[in-house]
């Protein structure tokens, strides 16, 4: 079950048993159809380190209810209402190959991905990697040292091997006209 249309139902089945006459029984019914997804949308988390982001998408041939949704590296539950699946309480990150599995074990096709982003207050350019900083968050920076440590008048210098930066944003001062 990979998101493709299901096979057609048979028109009749044969019941047979050794020593008995075969019986043909007519069958009718309809298949559910492919789990087709479209129109992926997202709402990013509202603050750093929060898990209030959402992903929504349209899905065909799935009745209302709660279903498992998998993505590379994790899974969650989606509520389907009127053909719209919604994943809630999501953290910042990339959700790759989002797939919904229905009650019959059928899954939607892979290949749909979205990235949720936190609101970053500022970025510090720092080699070897930049750091995105949120208000009231900490970031640790390291330094690359060469050995032996440099000396001054024959005494080794104490070198700061790591530093922690506490980011705080100061509100702008109102200006009266």
Image: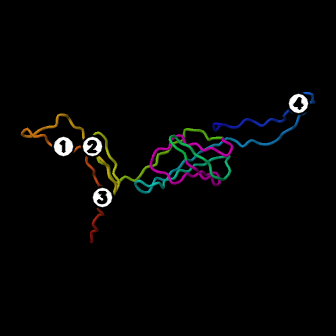
Q: Nearer the viewer, mark 3 or mark 1?
A: 1
Vertical side of 18 occupied by 89: above or below: below
Residues at discs 3 and 2 in contact (Cβ within 8 Å): no
Alpha carbons under labels 1 and 4: distance apart = 87 Å
Residue matched to label 1: 159
In what element is the residue under mark 4? loop
In what element is the residue under mark 3? loop
Q: Position of residue 108 (x, y in %)?
A: 62, 41
Residues at discs 1 and 4 in contact (Cβ within 8 Å): no
Which circle marks residue 17 in the picture? 4
| Dot 4 or dot 3, earlier in sequence | 4
Which quadrant, please, contains the C terminus? bottom left
Q: Nearer the viewer, mark 3 or mark 2?
A: 2
Residues at discs 2 and 4 in contact (Cβ within 8 Å): no
Disc 1 residue crowd, few under 14, some 14–19, many 20+, Cα 10 Å? few
| Dot 1 or dot 4, earlier in sequence | 4
Alpha carbons under labels 3 and 2: distance apart = 20 Å
Which quadrant, please, contains the N terminus? top right
**Residue 83 magenta:** yes
Q: What color scheme is it? A: rainbow
Which circle marks residue 168 in the picture? 3
- Quarter of the view holding residue 168: bottom left
């Amino acid at each position: 079950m990979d998101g493709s249309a299901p096979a057609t139902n048979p028109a009749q089945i044969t019941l047979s048993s050794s020593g008995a006459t075969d019986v043909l029984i007519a069958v009718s019914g309809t298949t559910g159809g492919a789990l087709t997804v479209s129109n992926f949308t997202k709402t990013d988390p509202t603050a750093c380190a929060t898990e209030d982001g959402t992903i929504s998408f349209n899905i065909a041939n799935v009745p209302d209810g709660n279903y498992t949704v998998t993505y590379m590296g994790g899974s969650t539950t989606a509520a389907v209402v009127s053909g719209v699946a919604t994943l809630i309480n999501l953290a910042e990150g990339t959700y790759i190959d989002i797939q919904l599995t229905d009650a019959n074990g059928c899954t939607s096709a892979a290949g749909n991905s979205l990235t949720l982003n936190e609101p970053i207050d500022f970025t510090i350019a720092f080699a070897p990697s930049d750091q995105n900083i949120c208000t009231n968050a900490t970031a640790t920076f390291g330094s690359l040292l060469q050995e032996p440590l440099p000396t001054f008048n024959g005494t080794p210098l104490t070198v700061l091997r790591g530093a922690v930066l506490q980011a705080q944003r100061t509100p702008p001062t109102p200006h009266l006209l």
